[in-house]
Image (cartoon, helix red, strand yellow):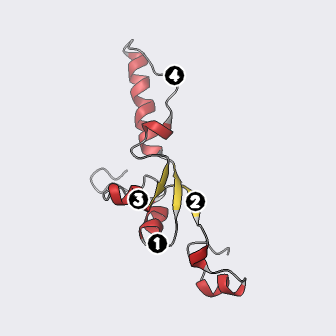
Amino acid sequence: MPTSILSAPKSRWKQQGYTVADLYLTGGGAASIAIDAIREGRWDATLAYFPKTMGAMAAEQIVNAIEGKPVTQIINMDTAGPLEAMIDKDVLDANPDFKGEMGSVDTNTGV
């Protein structure tokens, strides 16, 4: 089974000649596990992906079309998401309640 970079032991990095603290670790998706890793100092950043927000915005446009209201054809998630597209510790410090939309479940709705 492949080892995730999140769970790779620091000794493995040292064996390869790397000092983990000197690496810039980033990911893509802004999943809950990545948000936790940034907050804990194991990752430096993640490129955001907001599936719940995208789905809600798409559904809103479908309702607009059904109701004969104007429909937004393109939504730029780099600017329309709940946070800026590149999430690092500074962004998370400014948004302490953000949990990530992938890999998280809202305990109120189950989604």
Classify mark 1: residues with Cα within 10 Å, few (<14), some (14-19) or many (20+): some
Determine which of the numbered discs, if any, sits on residue 90 in the image: 3
Figure check: 90 above or below 23: above
Instruction: Classify mark 4: helix, strand or loop.
Output: loop
Question: Mark 4 to mark 1: distance in Å?
Answer: 38 Å
Classify mark 4: residues with Cα within 10 Å, few (<14), some (14-19) or many (20+): few
**For discs 4 and 3, the disc positioned in front in the rendered view:** 3
Task: Name the residue at 67% across, 73% down.
Answer: 2
Determine which of the numbered discs, if any, sits on residue 41 in the image: 1
Instruction: Classify mark 2: helix, strand or loop.
Output: strand
Residue sticking out furthest to the top: 68
- Contact? badges 4 and 1 (CB < 8 Å): no
Give the mark nearer the N terminus: 4 vs 1: 1
Determine which of the numbered discs, if any, sits on residue 6 in the image: none
Q: Position of residue 93 (x, y in %)?
A: 35, 60
Q: Position of residue 18 (x, y in %)?
A: 67, 80
Q: Amino acid at mark 4?
A: Gln
Q: Position of residue 74 (x, y in %)?
A: 52, 26
Give the mark nearer the N terminus: 3 vs 1: 1
Question: Mark 4 to mark 3: distance in Å?
Answer: 32 Å
Give the mark nearer the N terminus: 2 vs 3: 2
Q: Which quarter shows the N terminus?
A: bottom right
- Contact? badges 3 and 1 (CB < 8 Å): no
**For discs 2 and 3, the disc positioned in front in the rendered view:** 3
Instruction: Classify mark 1: helix, strand or loop.
Output: loop
Q: Amino acid at mark 1?
A: Gly
Determine which of the numbered discs, if any, sits on residue 27 in the image: 2
Determine which of the numbered discs, if any, sits on residue 73 in the image: 4
Figure check: 26 above or below 67: below
Question: Mark 3 to mark 1: distance in Å?
Answer: 12 Å
